[in-house]
Every structure is written in C-alpha cells, then in structure tokens.
Amino acid sequence: MAYKILIIDDDTELLKMLKKYFEIKKYEVITAENGVEGLQKIKLQPDIILLDVNMPNLDGIEVCRRVRDKVDCPILFLTARVEEQDVVNGFSSGGDDYILKPFRLKELDARITAHLKRETRRKEKTEVCFQGELCIDYQAKTVQIHADYLELTKSEYGIIEFLTMNPGMVFDKERIYERVCGYDAEGDSRVVTELIRRIRKKIQQYTENKYIETVWGMGYRWIK
C-alpha cells in the first residue's frame, strides 16, 4: 500500500512539482493550497504532512497546533525562516522536523523516507519500560509518571524513546537530532536543546527525579 502524503502550501507551482515528483515515487499525494483547505483534508488520514509555515490567513504553525492532537503522523515544516524563535515555535506547536526553502527534492525525499521508516519501527515495538515511578509504553508511544501521562510532541517522545533504549550512553546533539528527526545529516543543536528543555519541564511537573543528564561538552544521557 502506498504511503499517503498531504502537502499544504500556497505556492501552487511548488505543489504541482512536489505532487508530480512524489507520484513518480509511488506515493499517494494530497494537496491543499491554504491552511483552511489543509485542515479539511486531514480527515483523509495522511501518513505524513508537509506544511508550509508562511501562508496567509492561517499559517502553518496554527494549522499544526490545531491538528496535532488529532493526528499521529509526522509533520514536517517547509520554511524559509531560520531564526531560533521560529524553530522553537515550530517544534512547540507539535512539528517533528523542518526543511529550509529552497530545498533539494532528494533531501526532502530522504527525510520523508526516514520519518516513515521510524514510524514503522515504532509501530512494531511492544516493549514497556519501567523505571521507578516512570513507565514508557513503546507501542502506545506514551510516557507515564504515576497515574499521569506526559503531554509530549512526537519529537519530545522520540528523544525519550531513543535515550531510554540506550540508558547510560552519552549522545551529542547531532546524533540525537539524526536519530529522532530521522535524517542522516548534521543536526541542529538549537532544536535538540529546546526539546530537552521542554521534556525536563514536563517531567518536573510530576517528580523531582532527574532522568536526563547533561554531560558538559559531550551531550546528554538517560540516567539508569
């Protein structure tokens, strides 16, 4: 069965090019020319969403906020913005990755493939990890402390999953980015730093235990 991609962008020429390219790659491609139309097509249950940030009336950040609790698939932002706050806003709204415009089609294709493969691997997991008060269900992709479930974005959960499956091992920001965002390229340390900060803040709402340790000059590790 072909993977289903929803592309939301107000650049009609870009939409046509991406639709043609990914149909050749045997994907089922759904397009939307604005945020409102994109929201309507979410019901078609795409496997991955490509979402332009800069759209009139309803931008990509707001679209992502509205759909994140309704869809479980990866959301990749297409953006010309490179400011740190824009990156933070994208991940805070529930995005999983971003690619800068203009981009190479092969690079975009590689990121999409990596995200879809990661989703397949996660769906196959049945393991549950218990560590004191904390419980991670790798199949349900949930993290629970006592009776409370953490409200995590896909990328935040991905970091927890990666670190907990390799407890005690130190990973630098680039390695974490590569594994969690699913693209074998130089990572963006700003993204990883922000995601780690948000994870810690959410954990601290329920416990004083420190699960993620910063190893200065090296990276992060999950404390055994």
Image (spheres, grey):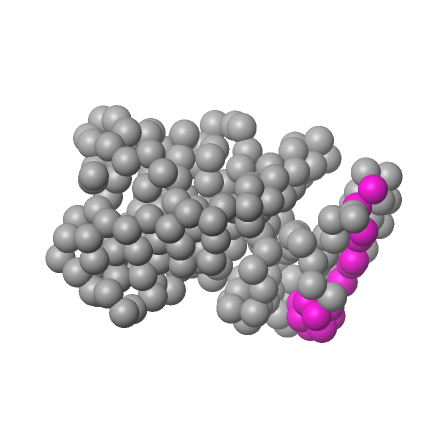
Image spot of residue 156 (x, y percent): 40, 51
Left or right: 65 in relation to 207 = right
Task: Choose between 223 and 146: the one closer to the eye.
Answer: 146
Q: Is residue 123 visible?
A: yes
34 relative to 53, above or below: below
Left or right: 220 in relation to 81 = left
Left or right: 205 in relation to 39 = left
Was residue 25 drawn as part of the magenta stretch in this picture? no
For the point 13% across and 57% down, the residue is 208
For the point 79% across and 58% down, the residue is 30
Task: Choose between 85 and 139: the one closer to the eye.
Answer: 139
Left or right: 105 in relation to 64 = right
Point out the stretch of residues depicted in magenta: 26-43
Image spot of residue 221 (x, y percent): 26, 35
Image spot of residue 12 (x, y percent): 81, 55
For the point 33% across and 34% down, the residue is 166
Q: Is residue 100 visible?
A: no
Image quadrant holding the C terminus, namely top left
181 relative to 142, above or below: above
Was residue 34 drawn as part of the magenta stretch in this picture? yes
User: Which quadrant of the structure image shows residue 35?
Assistant: bottom right
Task: Choose between 178 and 36: the one closer to the eye.
Answer: 178
23 relative to 147, above or below: above
